[in-house]
Image: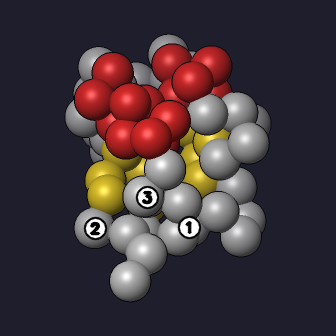
Amino acid sequence: MAKKVRIDPDLCVGDAICTDIAPDVFYMGDDGLAHVKEGMETAGDRADVQEAAEQCPGSAIIIE
């Protein structure tokens, strides 16, 4: 079963590290926070998404 990925908006600090590491999964919204692109919610198994979660300074990337 694919792991789901989401961003906790309360933890996101908006530094965009995730969009640098996995730009096809994450994007920066008009609110200055990172978001998961539509259709990419099940990308949690990908190595770049895992790396983005590890590098996130706010620990905002949640992989379930």
The x, y position of residue 24, in whole percent, is: 73, 42
Is any part of residue 9 visible from this angle?
A: no
Instruction: Identify the image quadrant of residue 2.
Output: bottom left
| Disc 3 element | loop
Q: Residue at x 34, y 26 (%)?
A: 56
Identify the residue under disc 3.
Answer: 44
The tag earlier along the polypeptide, 3 or 2, is 3
Instruction: Identify the image quadrant of residue 47.
Output: top left
Q: Residue at x 31, y 53 (%)?
A: 62
Horizontal arrangement in the rendering, residue 31 relative to residue 38 (left or right): left
Measure the alpha-carbon separation of dots 1 and 3: 7 Å
Q: Is residue 4 above or below residue 57?
A: below
Within 10 Å of disc 1 (Cα), the crowding (few <14, some 14-19, many 20+) is some
Horizontal arrangement in the rendering, residue 12 relative to residue 11 (left or right): right
- Identified by mark 3, the residue type is Gly
- Identified by mark 2, the residue type is Glu
Q: Quadrant of the C terminus?
A: bottom left
Measure the alpha-carbon separation of dots 2 and 1: 10 Å
| Disc 2 element | loop
The image's mark for residue 41 is 1
Say which of 31 and 35 sits in front.
Answer: 35
- Identified by mark 1, the residue type is Glu
Q: Is residue 26 above or below residue 23?
A: below
Measure the alpha-carbon separation of dots 3 and 2: 8 Å
Is any part of residue 30 visible from this angle?
A: yes
The x, y position of residue 33, in whole percent, is: 56, 35
Q: Tags 3 and 2 in contact by the CB under 8 Å rule? A: yes
Identify the residue under disc 2.
Answer: 64
Say which of 47 and 7 sits in front.
Answer: 47
Within 10 Å of disc 2 (Cα), the crowding (few <14, some 14-19, many 20+) is few
The tag earlier along the polypeptide, 2 or 1, is 1
